[in-house]
Amino acid sequence: KAGVTQTPRYLIKTRGQQVTLSCSPISGHRSVSWYQQTPGQGLQFLFEYFSETQRNKGNFPGRFSGRQFSNSRSEMNVSTLELGDSALYLCASSRSSSGGPDGELFFGEGSRLTVL
Amino acid sequence: GQNIDQPTEMTATEGAIVQINCTYQTSGFNGLFWYQQHAGEAPTFLSYNVLDGLEEKGRFSSFLSRSKGYSYLLLKELQMKDSASYLCAVVTGANNLFFGTGTRLTVIP
């Protein structure tokens, strides 16, 4: 079956702009999580959506937002971009949102954002 | 806050055994995952532990001690392709998943 698909794979923006990233989960997966990955900080949890509802949110400013559609596809948006937002943004889907074997995450290849 | 600690880097020889440790202090505990991430690629699932003890899966084993807030990933018969980052991730009591910063393992001939 098809894996998690993220678009775009690479993008370059300038400070102050906004960006929207898209994620299509594995068919049948209802949970979509977003992570920011940087060399020094590792994987930082942004938020999780389950059945179109934000279930959890990490410790990121309000400039970071997301949503999930009825087909489980998800988008995340970052407004007023800062240099420090340059990172790899990973989306992951899972069957359920709880801990446990069904909480195993399947990651997409990521969207690499560079802010100039 | 949540705290998950792993060594930053490790080096081991092809054919040897390596143990990657992970200690955690979190608000509750509902399980621990290990993921492998090769450079430039997405993380992939290796193991899941929720009960104390050792889970073995081929060359890879994962151990958990809930009372000590401690886990390790054991890799046997190391191969060059095992060079990657290994991420420890803990599910908290609120079912949030937090990752450690990862351990970069280099396997040398």
Image (spheres, rainbow, N blue to C red):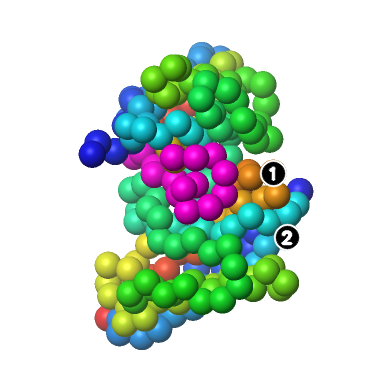
Apparent side of residue B50 relative to residue B12 in the rendered image (left or right): right
Tell me the quarter of the image containing the C terminus of chain B.
bottom left
Q: Work out whether residue A21 can be spotted.
A: no
Residue B105, disc: none
In the rendered image, residue B99 lying in the magenta stretch gets the answer no
| Rendered position, A6 above or below A38 | above
Instruction: Assess whether mark 2 and mark 1 are in contact (beta carbons under 8 angstroms).
Output: no
Tell me: residue B3, above or below residue A72.
below
- Crowd around label 2: few <14 · some 14–19 · many ≥20 (10 Å): some
Asked which secondary structure carries label 2, the reply is: strand
Q: Residue furthest bottom?
A: B16
Where is mark 2, residue-wise? B25
Instruction: Give residue B17's position: percent from left, percent from top.
Output: 40, 83
Q: The residue under label 2 is which amino acid type?
A: Gln
Identity of the amino acid at label 1? Ala
Q: Is residue B100 above or below residue B58?
A: above
What span is in magenta?
A95-110
Percent coordinates x, y for residue A112 in the rendering:
40, 33
Find disc 1 in the rendering and name its residue.
Answer: B94
In this rendering, the answer to whether B18 lies above or below A14 is below
* x and y, in percent, of residue B98 in the image: 60, 49
Q: In the displayed structure, does residue A4 sit left or right of residue A81?
A: left
Chain under disc 2: B
Q: Main secondary structure of the magenta part?
A: loop
Which mark's residue is nearer the viewer, 1 or 2?
1
Please name the residue shown 45% across and 17% down the image: A69
